[in-house]
Image (cartoon, helix red, strand yellow):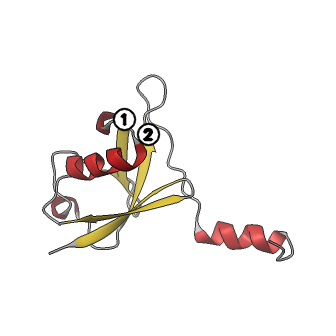
Amino acid sequence: MSMYIRVKRNKTTYFIQCDPTEKILGIKQKLNVLIDQPVNDQQLILFATGEVLEDSKSLAEQKVENDTIVALTLRKDGNEFEEVNIEQLNDFYQSRDTDAGNW
């Protein structure tokens, strides 16, 4: 059964078509094609819980369902990953409102 997940990083959202039995490593390989970042430098985090998704487990094993939001972080210099930074839709509307509705 085909599904999709939303992979978000900063202001960008990638809609990834996948299957519940697909491994996280496979999702990272799809992202590699889109963002040109090695799979070892990617970290996927279940946005709702903050749980880091394991490469060897399937989406279903980690309770990732259709239309789930997953955060993407990339490895910084050294061995650490950057913090999750996802701009929320509410942030967009607040910034517009503070600008008196002018675009």
What distance separates the C-alpha of mark 2 from that of mark 1?
A: 5 Å
Q: Quadrant of residue 102?
A: bottom right
Q: Quadrant of residue 6?
A: bottom left
Q: Amino acid at mark 1?
A: Asp
The residue under the point 30% across, 34% down is: 40
Marks 2,1: beta carbons within 8 A? yes
Picture coordinates of residue 79, whole percent (x, y):
40, 26
Q: Secondary structure at mark 2?
A: strand
Label 2 neighbour load within 10 Å: few <14, some 14-19, many 20+? some
What residue did someone put label 2 on? 74
Picture coordinates of residue 64, whole percent (x, y):
26, 65
Q: Secondary structure at mark 1?
A: helix
Location of the N terminus (image quadrant): bottom left
Residue extending farthest to the top is 78
Q: Amino acid at mark 2?
A: Leu
Numbered-mark total: 2
Residue extending farthest to the right is 100
Left or right: where 1 falls relative to 38: left
